[in-house]
Amino acid sequence: MNFLQKLFGGIPTTDLKNFMEQGAFLVDVREPAEFAGGSTKGAVNIPLGTVASQLNKFKGKENIIVFCRSGNRSGQAKTILEQNGFKNVVNGGTWQNVNQFVK
């Protein structure tokens, strides 16, 4: 695993593709203005600052992929979710990285 994957909690793209094919819940954790400027098809916008107060939106989701502009905020979102008992969370890194697997 490379340094950035370790730092931001990302996963290899082959695993990300598998999660996408399994119908993962896609969450863009950028701010609404950033989200409005473009995101991944099918993604919902739950800004990082509101993740902890919107945990109910994540319940019952088999696989969750969080992403943002650089992978930093999504890494923080992954940590918040894991601290609240979610085990099926991956940091997709950038929205463009996740977007390449959307059909």
Image (cartoon, helix red, strand yellow):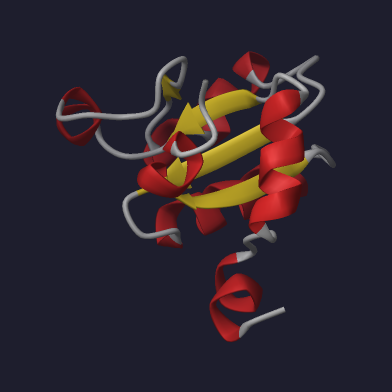
User: Does residue 84 show up?
Assistant: no
Instruction: Give the residue furthest to the bottom.
Output: 3
Residue situated in front as seen by the camera: 70 or 21? 21
Left or right, 86 with reference to 52: right
Q: In the picture, which quadrant includes the N terminus?
A: bottom right
Question: Which residue occupies 42% across, 54% down?
Answer: 73
Residue 61 falls in image quadrant: top right
Q: Is residue 90 above or below residue 101?
A: below
Counting from the top left corner in percent of width and height, residue 55 is at 63, 24
Is 12 placed above or below 45 here?
below
Toward the viewer: 13 or 73?
13
Q: Which residue sits at x=41%, y=38%?
A: 29
Q: Position of residue 66 (x, y in %)?
A: 55, 40
Q: Position of residue 37 (x, y in %)?
A: 15, 29
**Residue at (45% x, 48% y) in the render:** 97
View extreme (front): residue: 103
Q: Does residue 31 appear left or right of residue 77 in this picture?
A: left
Mark yes or no: residue 10 visible. Answer: yes
